[in-house]
Image: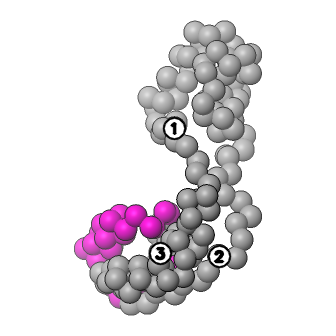
Amino acid sequence: MDKIDKKILAELQADGRLSVTELAHKVGLSLSPCHRRVKALEETGIIKGYRAQLDISQLGLNFSTIVFVTLKNGDKDSVLSLEEAILKVPQIVKAQRLFGDPDYLLHVVTYDLESYQKLYDEHLSALPNVQRLISTMVMKNIISHRSVLF
């Protein structure tokens, strides 16, 4: 990956809807080489896809929680069953497995405290092999969707 590929990635992170013509102009390439580079970045998996970034508060999702998960057992089957169960809960918008304690960090969004309580009681507390769940409310998002800097 050279300097031009990094420029392409930076521009696409800032605006994924740029046409190849606009992108080529911004990075100082002609259309065909720019298109080839974008295709190569997609084919190698560096560019995994394109998506819209939503303002979740505009959708009424005003309650954001971080949930720390500690497992009872850390064996392979327990980890896999928990991760499979997490994938089935659409309100979990990001899940990370951690080194140390706790074992997982879940980012959860819901409409309000009442809907979070219902989600917690019906789904989160039923996650397999969980020893402890600790929830903390998000007061304010300072950075979300930051681009990777080059």
Checking the image for residue 104, the label placed there is 3
Magenta stretch, residue numbers: 66-94
- Looking at the image, is mark 2 or mark 1 earlier in the sequence? 1
Considering the numbered disc 1 on the image, is that residue within a helix, a strand or a loop?
Answer: loop
Relative to residue 29, is residue 74 depicted above or below?
below
User: In the picture provided, is 92 more to the left or to the right than 139?
Assistant: left
Residue behind mark 2: 138
- Residue 100 seen in this snapshot: no
Q: Quadrant of residue 5?
A: top right
Q: Residue at x 52, y 87 (%)?
A: 134
User: In the picture provided, is 90 more to the left or to the right than 42?
Assistant: left
- Looking at the image, is mark 1 or mark 3 earlier in the sequence? 1
Q: Residue at x 30, y 81 (%)?
A: 128
- Residue 109 seen in this snapshot: yes
Which amino acid, mark 3?
Tyr
As measured in the structure, the alpha-carbon distance from the residue carrying label 2 to the one carrying label 1 is: 27 Å
Q: Quadrant of the C terminus?
A: top right
Image position, residue 87 (x, y; %) = 35, 64
The answer to the question of whether label 2 and label 1 lie on touching residues, with beta carbons closer than 8 A, is: no
Of the pair 58 and 82, the residue shown nearer to us: 58
Relative to residue 104, is residue 37 depicted above or below?
above
The answer to the question of whether label 1 and label 3 lie on touching residues, with beta carbons closer than 8 A, is: no
Residue behind mark 1: 50
Relative to residue 40, is residue 16 depicted above or below?
below
Considering the numbered disc 2 on the image, is that residue within a helix, a strand or a loop?
Answer: loop
Q: Nearer the viewer, mark 1 or mark 3?
A: 1
Q: Residues within 10 Å of mark 1 (few under 14, many from 20)?
A: few
